Amino acid sequence: MRAGSRAGRIAALPAIAAVALVLGAPAAARPYSVEDMVHQESFGQVAFDPTGRRLVYERRVARAQAPRFADEVRPEVVENQLRVVDLSRPAKARPLIPGDPTGVTMGPFSPDGRRLAVYGMRGDLWRLGVVTLATGHVRWFPVTPEFPYRTRTLQWLSPTQLVAIDRPRDSLPLILKINSEGQRELPDRWRRAAHGELAVTAIGSGRYIDVRPRKAASHLVQVDVVSGRRSILAAGDIEDLEVAPDSRHIAFVEAGEDIRLVADRHVNGPYGAASRRERLGLVDVATGRVARPCPALDLAGQLLSWSPSGHQLLVFARPDGAPWRAGQALRVTPEGAVEALALGDGTPALRYRPEAARAVWLGEVPALLVNRGERQDWVASHDGSATVLTGALASVPASLQPTPDGAVGLIQGRAWKLTPTGAAALATPDDLEAAPPRPVQEARLSYNPPSPSAAVLARRVTDTGAWAVDIDRSQRLPPIPLPDAHSAVAAFAPQRQALAVTSADAHGVERLQLWAGGHWVLIDATNLGQNDVDPLEGLIVHHPDADRAPDGGALDSWLYLPPSRPGAPAPPLIVVPYPGQRHRTPASVADYGVDYLTPSLPALVGAGYAVLTPSLPLAATAEPVDGLGARVLAIVDAAAVQHPGAFDTTRLALWGHSFGGYGVMAIITQTDRFRAAIDMAGPSDLISIWGTLQAPRRVDPSEGLGVSGVIGWAEDAQPQLGGPPWSDPGRYLRNSPILQADHIHTPLLIMAGDQDHIPMSQGEEMFSALYRQDRDAMLLTYWGESHILYNPASVRDAYGRGFAWLAENLRRPVRAEAAEPAHSRAPGSATTAPTPR
């Protein structure tokens, strides 16, 4: 979900009343369509330069205008265009680079604010560039940078020197090629095989674990952006870096050997989901000396943080083969000395998938979130001793934002500051709520900020409006009135008291607004063509589910209806299930933007269907399909009672994507009340998907096999199977829809992409099972597509065929008394209750 997507439900403040006049009043309402979906625009990163003179942001073109469709995982690499706003003329945004090219992604600003590092797709090549902000001139360098996905891959050493991870020449980062490597590599391998040349990939296990292709070394490089000189600082399979604040040292993380799995040990959880060890390295920039201070320790990837002086580095690591709960927070000096931090009677509070400890620097003193009995506390680690900072507080923030002399957090609506000696309440207004800024780089998770921020904002909402409140007392800035209570803070320049926010209204129109000179200015808006689409209006459906609601008692689901027409029959109902998901708030049009997470509720409602999103949380020990059909039908029946006449109870359908597609197939093995079903990219056979290699890793396993990912998903994530197939075969059999396919009588449309990490064979297996029984089914294979359809032609076709499938199978109401046994029932017939199995 995009930040601020529900902002349109709050009335705008008088400060921006004029903005509405710029956009104009909505025209006569119309249904949302698939064409709206493929023409979605959006904003990406938004940031002020370090001087606060300029605001730069990414504007992403509509998918229908994108120049290519192969790099599906990170679509912004081909859709981004950069815009710049000079705060001396804040109403005028212009292209940052002459010609306004697409496919340029923001990196960090130089310390003096004169330059911006960028990543760019140059044809089929991924390149590092630097833009001069005053002129827009961009210089491209012969560097293939790693992509900043949960790691930092590029950082400035000085106004003219930067350091970057340079991949093997002209190779695409894994996150960019994960769904397109087969398209790039397989034709050449087939050609070689056709000409009698060898085309083989070998991978090994056990004594042969080292048998697999290895990626050529990456390099940590220093680049002079003026002269173009490039020098190598270190070599290895480098994935992350962090420059010390004094720029004298650089910490980096490189991938080590593959992690061996142990037969009786969980893949995820305490032992983590990573497939390779992570090792720490240090570079002395002046001397070029490279040190690897703890070669037998495996680093958690989300903590690599220098103290403000640059004299200490904080990491979290475990001995090889140990669970993460046996790991320790370590203080590392630039010379390579390693010391474990004292945490008193506490143990680090860890998050998993990915594994991470939460820490912050309080000046030169590190503080960690630790488990202490039944509660968690922040603990400062001094030389050999520990101080509990939050022990006297009623509750403890899970994350903190650093300030120059400590860190601040919100507790029950009040701002508190943590210092090395304890916590103290700040003299700020009460009833504050978190308003975290969108990060300048999507490089490190928010609970481990890499460096102290200039200011920390919270949000205060009252009956008269909403304000952004600076809770770092050193700034002493007046509260800034927000356009509405749900504006997302995109960027803040405290030295100029400038604030950028994004928001989206109920029609999906997204706005970027700037507070400068004491008033709000509309900088840009996307999706103006949707200004007249019907908003989604969610009707709440209460239903009991005491066994599975995490807090006991009732759950809430949501019903969405198309606009009613006098005399028109009640619309059919599409249920969109996703086992394990709980819907606490209703969705909006803006929630279904450029990512095409399917199915799109606005598109389904726009096509004239009522849509129900049921809350289906799973208990920790529950099996995912246990009673799933009955649970969904109970929610359908509750919706019919609570909203009588809202939909046709005899014309029910299912449409699900991914684990929702799995849910669709499981449900129709348990009931025949649904007359049509659509599965998009859902797994059907938990035995055959267990251990399957992802298509691109099958082609190129040089950056790890990724086996632990899918195994861990099956055993410890969504299906909750608890172990490998041989440990409890019955659990796999009971929860694999393919093995209950003889109970399916509902017409099923199956959609799959050949590059999906959920193999297209999963859809093929289910289709074959229905074909074997002469049941109504259709299989659509979208070539070159992955888990989410990206090509607009694929999207148009999938929804066109999906709506045709529903129209054909839902065309006539069915008598409620039709309740024959399942084996003699007509395909897809509806009953008033689930068929017992």
Image (cartoon, rainbow, N blue to C red):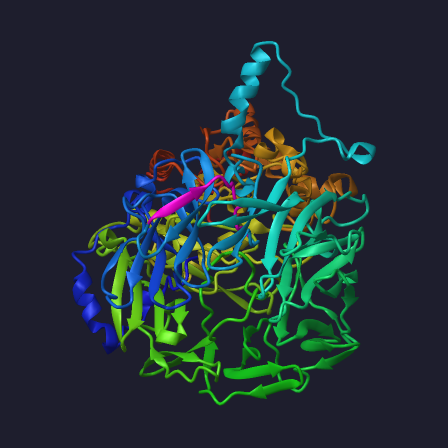
Q: Quadrant of residue 478?
A: bottom left
Mostly what secondary structure, the magenta segment? loop
Measuring 61% from the left and 34% from the top, which residue is drawn there?
A: 697
Residue 652 at x, y percent in the picture = 41, 46
Residue 437 at x, y percent in the picture = 45, 67
The quadrant the C terminus occupies is top right
Above or below for 481 versus 174: below
Measuring 67% from the left and 73% from the top, which residue is drawn there?
A: 366
Measuring 60% from the left and 54% from the top, which residue is drawn there?
A: 241
Residue 342 at x, y percent in the picture = 78, 73
Residue 177 at x, y percent in the picture = 52, 37
Going by the image, does 534 lie left or right of 305? left
Q: Nearer the viewer, residue 747 or 435?
A: 435
Measuring 25% from the left and 53% from the top, which residue is drawn there?
A: 530
Residue 268 seen: no
Q: Nearer the viewer, residue 791 or 133?
A: 133
The quadrant the N terminus occupies is bottom left
Q: Nearer the viewer, residue 662 or 248?
A: 248
Total of numbered circles in the picture? 0
Going by the image, does 5 lie left or right of 674? left
Residue 559 seen: yes
Q: Which residues are magenta?
A: 137-149
